[in-house]
Image: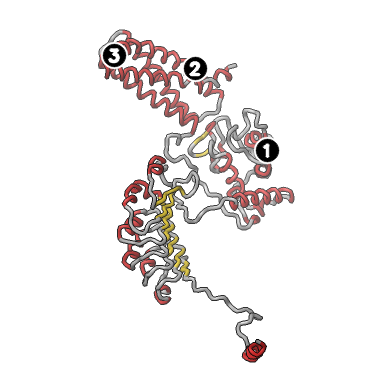
Amino acid sequence: MLELIGKFHPLIVHLPIGIFCLAIIFKTMAYLNKNKSLEDILPITIFIGFAFSLLSLGTGYIHANMESIDSSLSAKHQFSAWMLTLWSFILFLLLKKSANLYFVHISWFMLLIQVILTGDYGGRLTHGINYFELSKEIHYTRPEIRNPDSAMVYRDIIEPILAAKCWSCHSAKKQRGGLRLDGKDWILQGGKKGKVLIPHDTVHSEISRRISLSEAEDDHMPPNGKPGLNKNEMQILKWWIAGGADFEKSMMESKPDAQMQLTIKNYLNSLESESQSITINPYIPLIKVSALDDGLLQAFNSKSISLQRIAQNSDWLYLVIHNNEYDPELVKIVKMKDHIAWINASHSKMNDKLIDFFTSCSQVTKLDLSHSVLTDAMLSKLSSLSNLKSLNLSNTPIHTIDFLNKMHSLQHVYLYNSSVPQEIIRTINVPGLSIDTGHYVVPLLKGDTSEIKRKELEEFNKEN
């Protein structure tokens, strides 16, 4: 029964916070508008909030003891909740007795501070210690396994499983039940309720027991709503525990039997297939860009310029210029220039204004200037585009490309039908850069007919 009551805490706890926030709004409105009726309802509003605070304290105490919750963060949350309740009661008494405004204002301020702190600690307890941080990602890169026999069991097999399925609740950024599973020492230490891993004993190891439960059971891990371990992952984790849960052995040293070798192979193959199924466009910037303002994008309307997302749900943009010269409409997209990844200005009549606009788009990775009227002086300005990977200069009247030596991110340059001499092209020294001139030569294979013999030609002419 107590456990059921404790489970109501996440619901009840929002009531006092909401009521106190409403009281603060009433107080602000009463002060600004000199509204006496709002002043009159403040004592009863604060008292109702105080009553629900007491109820939240009771259910919270039960909840903290019934559930496995991070003790240090829980203690801070409980202390701030007690202080919130205390200050709400003090404020209620001061309002009822029409006390000195100085003390009343201090109490209002302390109430606001405690509402913020209590909500902050509660949010971190529920959603992780990084709940109010901008970045919540757990930075982990699964190691590449070239040879399964030489792979390290924990580092290459077990840790990636824990990272994918357990770290969202049990890592440096969040410790449900005081448990961390992102390192050897933390795993062996266990959580608030004791050890979760007993080497050679899958029956009494809490990790093994919880992942084996049906999803309908409360103790099943991961909890509902989070991706669970598949059959191969569960078998591999139990095999590791049964074998002693060693953190240093390689696959060869662990000597898995034929069946486990097949399970591990299937698991690794599934990861490889999953990785290969994701197509990554090499010209999409890898950095994270701020959210794109749809209002700005929709407001832009030009017949000679098109601007659209490079993919659905992407915040990167693709700019296409259809006219033959600089269009003043470009000024309207200055606020979005840091979102532009690709530019197509093919067949455009270039000028310094247009080139300057391109160079101001610092995140551009792909630029097409083919069939455009360009000068060597204009091109030299492009060296400031430090993220440019692809540059198309086909069918342009340029004579030199020495500026490319300053562009170390470039991967592909296209020079079909250009006037750049081969001796200049050979001076370009950028690691990994491919310069495509279009001067392809098809090699002759043995048996290919490359000429008609004179005698055969004469016979052909006689017959015709």
In the rendering, at what x and y percent does residue 404 appear?
39, 66
State the CA–CA distance, disc 1 to disc 3.
68 Å
- Dot 1 alpha-carbon crowd within 10 angstroms: few under 14, some 14 to 19, many 20 or more: many
The label nearer to you, 2 versus 1, is 2
Q: Which mark is residue 58?
A: 2
The label nearer to you, 3 versus 2, is 3
Query: Relative to 349, is 463 above or below?
Result: below
State the CA–CA distance, disc 3 to disc 2.
36 Å
Q: Nearer the viewer, residue 39 or 140?
A: 39
State the CA–CA distance, disc 2 to disc 1.
37 Å
The residue at which mark 3 appears reads as: 35
In the rendering, at what x and y percent does residue 354 appear?
33, 57
For the N terminus, the quadrant is: top right
In the rendering, at what x and y percent does residue 52 appear?
45, 15
User: Amino acid type of disc 1?
Assistant: Thr
Q: Residue at x 39, y 50 (%)?
A: 303
Query: Relative to 84, is 443 above or below?
Result: below
User: Amino acid type of disc 2?
Assistant: Gly
Secondary element at tag 1: loop
Secondary element at tag 2: helix
Say whether marks 1 and 3 touch (CB < 8 Å). no
Task: Please give left or right for residue 261 compared with residue 135 in the image.
Answer: right
Mark found first going from the N terminus, 1 or 3: 3
Q: Nearer the viewer, residue 70 or 273?
A: 273
Say whether marks 2 and 1 touch (CB < 8 Å). no
User: Amino acid type of disc 3?
Assistant: Asn
Q: Residue at x 34, y 62 (%)?
A: 350
Q: Which mark is residue 202?
A: 1
Q: On the image, which quarter does residue 325 sit in?
A: bottom left
